[in-house]
Image (spheres, rainbow, N blue to C red):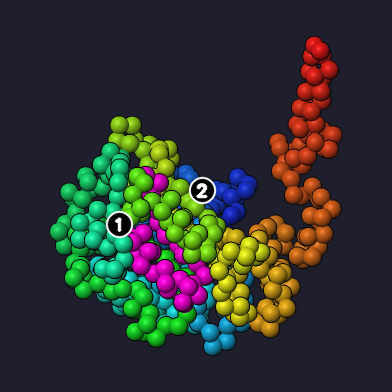
Amino acid sequence: MLLENLVTRRVSEENASDSSLTRRVTKQGHLLLAALAVPVAETDTTPYTANKISIEIQQSWGKMNMEGMNVQAKFVEMVAAALGEQLFTLLDVGCSGGIDPSWRQFGKHLRAFGFDPSLSEVERLNADERSDSVEYIPCFVGVPDDISGSERLKTQQFWDRSAWSRLAVGKTLELRSQKVEPNDEREKMRLNLWNQTRLADAEKPVFLCDFVEKRGVDNVDFVKIDVDGPDFLILRSIVPMLKSKQVLGVGIEVNFYGSDDPDVNTFHNVDRLLRAAGFDLFDLSVRRYSLTALPSPYLYSFPAQSKTGRPFQGDALYLRDLGSTDPSLPKINSAPVKYAKLAALFALFGQPDSAAELLLLHREELSELFDVSAGLDALLLQSRPQASGTSYSDYITAFQNDDPMFYRAIDGAGPFNSDAKDSPISHLTKALAGVFRKAPK
């Protein structure tokens, strides 16, 4: 994990704006990946941002973390330093490869429980783990019998209308799986063939609601679910916990294919359930997969999503919207630490504007924990790295003055603003005005 953090911090995530920097980032990325024995095609000249390097390394080590998480957010470290004796609690269901390194920014305040059925993978994770507050449990996460749809864990009917057998990635994985040595469990994990590794006893599942009670966990901040099957049923089973444990966010893999069956893991089922529980959608990735009939190149150096194809799966992020004044939304613990943790989650998932709104709405309470003005400055730097040296207050003043920096420049012609005399928009406006003047009445 230390090495992965080093790699992701070495190369800036959003810095491929000029060609020379792009070349340097690409070169560094290939060198780092080569040093870690991550295969990269010699012809691959794609800029290797920190995010892409992290994805390649994760897959090489047998994992894919939730999309959308920021590698580094200074604001999160500020919140962690202000937590005192409080802990940030994470439940990671389907933790192959370990928890996302972004969570490590909470430092000693992080308490994480990872669940995965692959025995060898969990053994490796626990052996490598250096924190006493991060634990990996070898088990299947189950669904109690009184939960609607629980019988599907026996029939394994978690999908409808899946095109997997027709996808190019399915064919590639099928071909590669035939070459895997029977005892090569690491390669099986890389190819997502986890069900061919040594597995925990499926007849002795762990139920999440029972688990947190037995462990004396009185507060859960984030739940991530990615188990390639009963994701939605597991989510349904923890609805009581979402309220009782004051859960702030849920990340879950969703499918964009399927039917109107209320028990399968489709985006519309997940969305309906979490909105009813008081959460709002804050991010949604879309992974496209091409068909075997005309395969599109893969985006990475391993078989996964492709450049073109149908939207097949994605990661959905749901968080509490405590900035909303809608009275129908359920209330949660109003302690300042909860506001701080939620703001940290917004920053972690690339939503610094929502974090800033939360800081402004609860400035008085949050001032008990940290310097809110410094927090706003840190969020501004995350949102606009080029604004380094600009204070949040000056930035907002510029926005209120309709500063040109808030508009897109086109071909170097100035801000995306029709007031710019030589901008393309200005020329287009004049041309259209001429057309309308000549139009017959």
Q: Which residue is mark 2?
A: 47
Front residue of 368/30: it is 368
Q: Residue at x 22, y 46 (%)?
A: 174
* Left or right of residue 258: residue 415: right
Expressed as whole percent of the image width and height from the top left, the position of residue 385 reads 67, 59
Position of the N terminus by quadrant: bottom left
Q: Is residue 318 visible?
A: no
What residue occupies the far top of the structure in this picture? 440
Magenta span contains residue 236: yes
Q: Which residue is mark 1?
A: 229
Q: Decide: is 422 above or below 2.
A: above
Q: Residue at x 58, y 64 (%)?
A: 328
Front residue of 424/336: it is 336
* Dot 1 crowding, Cα within 10 Å, few <14, some 14–19, many 20+: some
Q: Decide: is 195 above or below 18.
A: below
Span of residues in magenta: 230-257
Magenta span contains residue 362: no
Residue type at the position of mark 2 = Pro
* Left or right of residue 194: residue 398: right
* Left or right of residue 18: residue 184: left
Expressed as whole percent of the image width and height from the top left, the position of residue 371 reads 71, 78
Instruction: Determine the CA span between mark 1 and mark 2.
Output: 34 Å
